[in-house]
Image (cartoon, grey):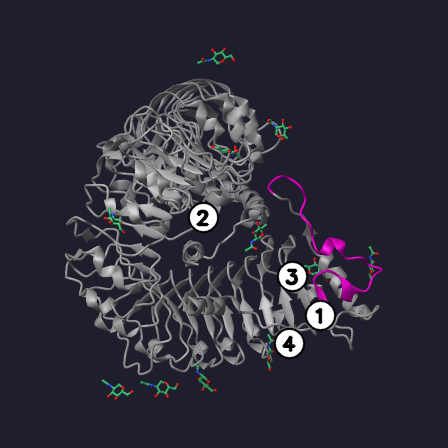
Amino acid sequence: MMIIWTLCLIFFLSDSTLVFASPAKHLCRPDQKDALWKFKSEFYVEGFHSDGTPVNKKTERWRNNTDCCSWDGVSCDPKKGVVVKLDLEDSFLNGPLRSNSSLFRLQHLRSLNLDNNTNLYGDLPDSISNLKYLRVLSLARCNLFGKIPSSLGNLSHLTNLGLSGNGFTGELPDSMGNLNRLRELRLDNNKLGGNFPLPLLNLTELTFIYLGSNRFQGMLPSNMSSLSKLVSFHIEKNSFHGSVPSSLFMIPSISELAMGSNDFSGTLEIGNISSPSTLIALSLPENNFKGPIPDSISKLVGLFYLDLALWNTEKATVDFSVFLPLTSLIFLDLSYINTRSMFDLSLFSSFMLLGYLDLSGNNLKISEPLSLPLPIGTLALSSCKIVEFPKFLQNQTILLYLDLSRNQIEGQVPEWLWSLPELRYVNISQNSFSGFEGSADVIQRSQMLLLDISSNEFHDPFPLLPNTTKFFLGSNNRFSGKIPRETCGLVSLESLVLSNNNFNGSIPRCFEHLSTSLSVLHLRNNSLSGVFPEESISAPLRSLDVGGNKLSGKLPKSLINCTSLEFLNLEDNNFNDTFPHWLRFLPNLQILVLRYNEFHGPISSPGGSLSFPKLRIFDISENRFTGVLPSDYFAGWGAMSSVLDIVDRMPSRFEGRDSGNYRNSVSMTAKGLTMELVGSGFTIYKTIDVSGNRFQGDIPESIGLLKELIVLNMSNNAFTGHILLSLANLSNLQSLDLSQNRLSGRIPPELGKLTFLAWMNFSYNNLEGPIPQGTQIQSQNISSFAENPGLCGAPLKETCGKKEEEATEQEQDEEKEEEEGQAFSWIAAAIAYVPGVICGLTIGHILFSCKPYWFVRIFHSFT
Ligand SMILES: *[C@@H]1O[C@H](CO)[C@@H](O)[C@H](O)[C@H]1NC(C)=O
Ligand SMILES: *[C@@H]1O[C@H](CO)[C@@H](O)[C@H](O)[C@H]1NC(C)=O
Ligand SMILES: *[C@@H]1O[C@H](CO)[C@@H](O)[C@H](O)[C@H]1NC(C)=O
Ligand SMILES: *[C@@H]1O[C@H](CO)[C@@H](O)[C@H](O)[C@H]1NC(C)=O
Ligand SMILES: *[C@@H]1O[C@H](CO)[C@@H](O)[C@H](O)[C@H]1NC(C)=O
Ligand SMILES: *[C@@H]1O[C@H](CO)[C@@H](O)[C@H](O)[C@H]1NC(C)=O
Ligand SMILES: *[C@@H]1O[C@H](CO)[C@@H](O)[C@H](O)[C@H]1NC(C)=O
Ligand SMILES: *[C@@H]1O[C@H](CO)[C@@H](O)[C@H](O)[C@H]1NC(C)=O
Ligand SMILES: *[C@@H]1O[C@H](CO)[C@@H](O)[C@H](O)[C@H]1NC(C)=O
Ligand SMILES: *[C@@H]1O[C@H](CO)[C@@H](O)[C@H](O)[C@H]1NC(C)=O
Ligand SMILES: *[C@@H]1O[C@H](CO)[C@@H](O)[C@H](O)[C@H]1NC(C)=O
């Protein structure tokens, strides 16, 4: 155990520590103080905790009349009075980092840390090279973008460079090859691209390379042995292909290789490693490896972490003996390896330290007694065709996490399960369970944190849960009656998912007792009725779905306090209210679905234009909205007008492991079909659907700003005027429905250039003139143009007269000029919104993000 602890410590010993004398009286040089003071004043410093109280900011405690060397976050050289270290991590510096920033006058800086100032934005200026003595430069989780400047290569003393979690794009500058003292390079979670940066191979001092979650591609260089001091090499979540170079395994110091979620293939050549391998973590899941698991893995005897999930053995048998020498394994993931071998759990008896075992998606030898002859913390046996609840679990006294989802187990969940002393997470979803064995309070006596029983055949009585429950997922079962009041006593509850049952009655008022914890509430597709009580809304809500019920009355105004709300789905109820303008105060709202209700009145805001900076799905179809949409209506809708995408939190396999596998879902009409979008599938969709209302007037010009829009449906209203040329800006559009309006004029030929626009409908309008010639337009069904008395040309049967064609061209030129003039102001408006849009995207560390947690637990269990 000691060995493992020591190895773990290695990961946490990173930053080289600089030691400074404590500051004497007023030793700060005036120019240094001036530069610091000006730097502070370049930003708007503000931030709040989730409960609304302002955070403690370091710069706020700086005082102009005190020694700047004593200021929070500032360290000086005691002799010269110059600032050598500035640590303003987490300091809420909001604003752009400019190239003339006073920061770059602090020329003696040896260490600069501005990590996690998430609203510090802009390019990383060339002038960074003014700070020529820098050893440590850390700007992780800010909002910097653009290319990494080549002037960085002039920082010849640099040992640690951390730019993780920004929006940097492009390739690394070749000048990085000059940073020959660099030991740690952290560039993960950006949008960097190109091939593996070869200049890095010259940096022989490198010990840590983190390039994960970027857009790198190509093959790795075959000879990487020049990186002779490399310890950790993380390049997961990119698009690298080719084989994993055996030279990596030959590096004498190498201990961690994280290369999952790429496109690596071939056989794994581990080469002729003579002395025992130093490698302790090998993570290769979600690649394109095919064929048998290589024997050479058995050489990696020091491994404690091995993840080969989704290695495609192509139905081969797995020679289990290759794993037997790996006696230090703590974590083993062999899920979904497409083998025809049956896993006999007794094979694992030699791994005395094993704490995490995932064999999901494989066949298990079910010959009773199925048993695992060692205690384990996490056991995942999802999709293993298990038909009977495994009895050996009774003896698993340290089991913390159990996943038996997607099997074929029927009958009752055994009573003894709930008395396993360490068990906190249970996922038995997608089986055919019908009930719980034992007395009504059998689960209540456990200390469950997560219980996922969704997609089974559970029926009443609804189980009594312990008040430790944080996540309860019970959708797709046969529960009925009122939502049990006992739920309101679950004071720790964060997710409550009861969709697709037969609950009736109203939403309990007593949900107010959950108002400090509940962040996911899904009651979709039940038969709930009545008004949504104001007090049932809890402030931390992130996701609220009550679609498919019979709720009526007004939308609870208390939603305005849910500043974290991302997902709001009220579709298919009887809500009778005016448009909730106040939702614009919810800065994180991404999905707003009001379709099929009785909402009415205008949607334009009395107090200026709406701005939904993060909104991606806006569906208010099939209501009774009226009025004219102002032409700047869509001007502040940043997420739909820029490529900024949504941060995915975890790799799919681990999605929801420790918070429950609930999925947001919405119905959506696109390409003339209604479909259900579920889970991560719809994070790519950016849609606007205002169909089936009573809108009048012109289509707002600002729609042309929403360049990322994929579906636009404005059908079945009373829109008048022409089809805007600016629609041709929507270069990602796949589905466009303008049918059943009163649009007149011609179909702009420019629409034919929208190469992704696979489906469009212009029927039932007053359009006229020839149908444009573009392939996409011409491939539409005739019905897409039906009932427009003046339209002519293919694919319609009506041919066009000559006069009409000439007139078209002239008119279009005029239209174009007119629209270009207008477009300018919308572009200005869009630019003005950009900072607001980029703000607040946080990007977490992904690779081992959910795993260390389990480790800690497992260690505790052993000691
Ligand atoms: C702080 O001091 C600087 C010079 O060090 C001066 O320029 C600035 O005006 C002072 N600001 C305040 C608020 O006193
Ligand atoms: C820095 O440049 C910006 C324009 O890029 C200018 O507005 C600002 O006044 C300059 N600041 C200083 C301190 O020179
Ligand atoms: C970054 O700052 C946010 C507050 O803005 C805080 O919640 C978060 O924990 C910080 N992240 C890290 C990794 O320090
Ligand atoms: C980097 O240093 C070289 C000379 O050492 C100089 O020519 C170049 O201008 C510097 N680049 C930057 C961006 O400072
Ligand atoms: C490494 O440095 C040498 C000279 O020091 C240079 O010739 C070579 O091109 C560099 N290699 C890369 C890949 O940058
Ligand atoms: C790989 O590079 C190292 C030095 O960088 C060299 O000594 C070694 O011979 C090379 N190996 C191969 C197989 O090219
Ligand atoms: C592997 O290395 C050992 C010495 O370290 C040597 O004796 C052996 O021949 C090598 N095997 C191969 C296949 O190169
Ligand atoms: C549990 O362990 C005991 C002894 O350690 C054994 O007798 C019993 O059969 C085990 N039960 C199961 C279900 O494996
Ligand atoms: C949870 O329930 C237990 C008894 O079941 C009780 O002792 C405890 O006080 C409750 N905790 C809270 C926070 O209500
Ligand atoms: C929002 O919360 C505040 C304080 O918790 C409360 O006073 C206010 O009434 C709430 N607003 C609404 C609309 O419920
Ligand atoms: C909506 O509520 C108003 C009163 O607020 C009422 O006049 C109207 O009939 C209601 N509409 C529907 C469809 O129930």
Q: Cα distance, mark 2 to mark 1?
A: 36 Å
- Disc 4 target residue: 132
Q: Which residue is denoted by mark 3 in the rendering?
A: 98
Which is nearer the N-term, disc 4 or disc 2? 4
Which disc number belongs to residue 20?
none
Which quadrant does the N terminus fall into? bottom left
Q: Is residue 56 visible?
A: yes
Which residue is label 1 attached to?
106
Mark nearer the viewer, 3 or 4: 4
* Disc 2 crowd, CA 10 A, few/some/many (<14, 14-19, 20+): some
Q: Is residue 663 left or right of residue 625?
A: left
Q: Looking at the picture, which amino acid does disc 4 mark?
A: Lys
The numbered disc on residue 646 is 2
Q: x and y percent of residue 58 in the render?
A: 70, 56
Left or right of 371? Residue 187 is right
Q: Secondary structure at mark 1?
A: loop
Please say if 696 is above or below 260: above
Q: Which residues are magenta?
A: 50-76
Q: Give the distance between the C-alpha atoms of the residues marked 4 and 1, in whole angstroms.
A: 10 Å
The kind of residue on which mark 1 rests is Leu
CA separation in Å, label 2 and label 3: 26 Å
- The residue that appears at 30% across and 40% down in the rendered structure is 428
Q: In the rendered structure, are the residues bearing label 4 and label 2 in contact, judged by CB atoms less than 8 Å apart? A: no
C-alpha distance separating marks 3 and 4: 18 Å
Mark 3 beta carbon near ligand 2 (under 8 Å): yes
Q: Are marks 2 and 1 in contact (CB under 8 Å)?
A: no
